[in-house]
Image (spheres, rainbow, N blue to C red):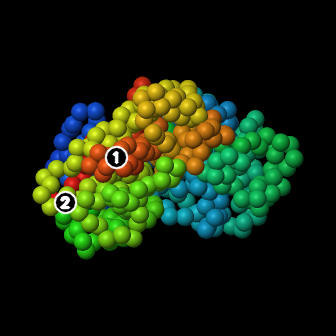
Amino acid sequence: MDTEHGARARRAGRSTLKLALVLLIVGAAAPVGAAEPAQGRVIDGPGAVLPERQRPTVVNAVLRERLDELLPSLMREAGIDLWLVINREYAEDPVYLTLVPEPVFAARRTTMLLFFDRGPEEGVERLTVSRYPLGELYEAAWEGGELDQQWRRLAELVAERSPERIGIDVSPTWPVADGLTASLRDRLEAELGAEMSSKLVSAEELVVRWLETRTASERALWPHTVALARGVISEAFSSRVITPGATTTEDVAWFIRERFAELGLAAWFMPYVNVQRPAVDCGADDPFCGAGGEVIRPGDVLHTDVGICYLRLCTDTQEMGYVLRSGESEVPAGLREALAVGNRWQDLLTAEFATGRTGNEILARALAAAEAESIRSSVYSHPLGYFGHAPGPTIGMWDNQGPTPARGDWTLRESTGYAIEGNVKAPVREWGGQEVQIKLEQSALYDGERVVYLAGRQTRWHVVR
């Protein structure tokens, strides 16, 4: 049974999480968009961003929820009795920073985490065998002393618990599950001895499931993060930023990057902006249309690709804009119809999401559905979560519209996030039948029954007037 202290700590954590969510919601009380059919949503600008000082409260309460309520079931699902996460400063295991509380930025010297499943009644024991403690979420089983003593203590703790399967982070398939370095593994096996080392197994299934699964609190927080990214795009693709004939695509890309920095939001890649325009045709076999490094002119079609991480959750977004010509009051009908084709492609893709299907199966079915409607599409959707390119079922790649070995064979589970990413090519009559490529990407959650766009999706063009 849980100790009284542990139960009280969990209750306090849940109360702290509720308070943190209230702080976030109150800070974002002003609406940032209006609902539209088919999950469309217009967002005029970014909403509230918590000060750095308040963010650990949210992050740590969510982490407590994940460690208390999610990790035990995932360890049993993966058949792991004891999980070891061992890393050193400047060579952190990718999963390490998702397991430790804020404001931890790195491993310190050699940092060891031990998770032992004591069964449904007692739950998962969480220990740190490290020079420095990690706070109340972990019990310190060793502090201080020499490195040799640290390793001996870890070996003692493992032997005392006598696990049948010891998970370690080694994987030929998933980089995020391959964080145990060769030298640390050698030392671990030497300290455990031959008999206990024979129980070492890959923890890749556990790591992937830990990283891909979203809890109730994360599902509540994530839409706001996605709306922040979409809000900055709406600012960038407007006359507040773009002066046709003067502003370049690079200017807009750097506005986006600097705007994120002003808001205290971390970009996980450099924003990209490009243009398509009449008389600059895209080859039928070109995977991507559009040029960067251009001065933006009236009549241009704009595209951007941006991603941020906030409160440990990442986004990945691509949207389209149009620069009105003199005398135009709205986007040409041919371009509006092309965006509608892109939205239809999204619907065909997400309709194929079903629990238990592999990424490769979803891809094949979505491509067939698009072909049946004569939609020329390319699918390259990927999981999203603590990383922008997160582990989980890969659903196509831009340079491979067939099966992706291993990662494409991962099955779809509920409460997992995805970047619904790809493109369509459609003729534009105002361009003399020349094709425009509609490149779309929106952050979404699969709830076990359907795909829900976390902050809506683009169903209207951004317009530079």
Residue at image position (42%, 25%) is 449
Vertical arrangement, residue 33 with respect to residue 1, above or below: below
Q: What element carries label 2?
A: loop
* Residue 380 drawn at (x, y percent): 51, 44
Per the image, the residue denoted by label 2 is 325
Query: Left or right: 419 with respect to 185?
Result: left
The residue shown at (19%, 65%) is 240
Identity of the amino acid at label 1? Gly
- Residue 433's disc is 1
Is 449 on the left-hand or right-hand side of 45?
Answer: right
Q: What residue appears at the point 25 percent right and 59 percent down from the top-left corner?
A: 299
Tell me, yes or no, if residue 221 can be seen here: no
For numbered disc 1, what is the local secondary structure?
Answer: loop
Nearer to us in this view, 45 or 27: 45
The answer to which image quadrant residue 357 occupies is top right
* Disc 2 residue type (three-letter): Arg
Instruction: Decide: few, some or many residues near mark 2? Use Cα within 10 Å; few <14, some 14-19, many ≥20.
Output: some
